[in-house]
Amino acid sequence: MSEGDTDGVVSLQEVLEEDQHLEDTANAVLGDSDDTQCTYPKGYVYRQALYACDTCTPEGVPPAGVCLACSLGCHEGHTLHELYTKRHFRCDCGNGKFSNFKCSICPEKEGENVKNKYNQNFSGLYCTCHRPYPDPEDEVEDDMIQCCVCEDWFHSRHLTGETPTSFSEMSCDTCMKSHDFLSTYQLRTNPVTITKEENGAAVNVTDTPPTTTCETGTSSAAETKSDSFKSDDKDGTGINVCELVRRRRLLSNCEGGDRKTEAGFFEENWRSQLCTCDSCKEMYSREDVLFLLDEGDSVGAYEKRGVVRLSSHDAGMEALGSTLDRVQQGEVFHQYNELKTELSDFLRDFARQGQVVSKRDIEGFFEEMQARKRQRLDTGEGVPPAQCHY
């Protein structure tokens, strides 16, 4: 193959790696959603993959969202906006928002799902720039990050403040302002000045806390780094202290500790640190963010549930096993494993050397495999014993 022929050609190793990446992504996003049954009968689903149909609900029509199964079975060929996942949503497909259109999977639906929440994503727009994604007019490569509160998506360059290299969840600027308690739980990667008391005198200490709080300092000499944030600690009065109150007290001694106007970024398992006292629970309910207390609500938790679901191959093998008898299963599994092993061995040398596999190479592989199979049948090798019946 000439140098000119290799332009735009990728190696088999790159193809295999990209294929695996796409499969892993699909399993994470869609793995915990049902692709055959409409989720409407399940009510307001915990979290699921959703789509908005621009064909059925164009501009000027109230927004609506459809589940994965309906996007495949009812809206095939339509213009769809992929919404990734949304929490506590009931499928709208074919309800009162769709004129003269019925869901083919679950046609009996109420006129409207009053508890559903919609944002600009359902119209194919995202971020504070209110642009589509991908944006044909935007040539800047940038990450899109979903807010864990309002669930809109944002370009990292359009968020106020610096985006850390590692984080688990993000709350956008607007949600940080609306729910100011979140600022006490966010990651703090910039140096802060903490006022400590030593021998009755105030001492300023500058440090870079590695976690969500100024754990390197305390509000008094009696408190230590290890117990500065324990919601079940006593305050010397025998009364449990609110976790939020304790954090705010500590942050009041940190210069630069208040960052309510910036987007907030949170480490893994940060939700487990949220205060669960009665007062804070009332506040979460009042601000309609009780879902933050549920670690299973996060997109990360949803993706973990997805990757442990059966892959398409495993599902195929399971279906195969339910329709064939044991002798047929054994023969098919044997032939499949033989093909998989031989094909892997055949392709491994190409991948190792970074070579491109041609159509002629693949055709030659299967021709040789068929020739070996015919030879085994001619000699009687591999033929089931007479007592085995199909």
Image: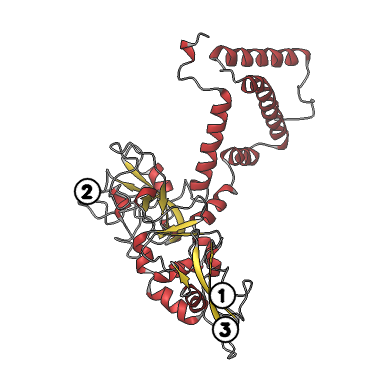
Residue 229 figure quarter = bottom right
Q: Position of residue 40 (x, y in %)?
A: 41, 57
* Residue situated furthest left in the rendering: 60
In primary-sequence order, the first of circles 2 and 3 is 2
The foreground one among 22 and 315 is 22
Tell me the distance, in whole angstroms, between the alpha carbons under discs 1 and 2: 54 Å
Q: Nearer the viewer, mark 1 or mark 3?
A: 3
Q: Nearer the viewer, mark 2 or mark 3?
A: 3
Q: Which mark is residue 218?
A: 1
Q: Label 3 crowding class (10 Å Cα cut-off): few <14, some 14-19, many 20+?
A: few
Residue denoted by label 2: 59
The residue at the point 42 percent across, 45 percent down is 143
Residue 340 higher or lower than 100, as above or below: above
Tell me the distance, in whole angstroms, between the alpha carbons under discs 2 and 3: 66 Å
The residue at the point 73 percent across, 16 percent down is 377
Q: Position of residue 219 (x, y in %)?
A: 54, 78
Q: Which amino acid, by three-letter code, is at mark 3?
A: Gly
Q: Which amino acid, by three-letter code, is at mark 1?
A: Thr
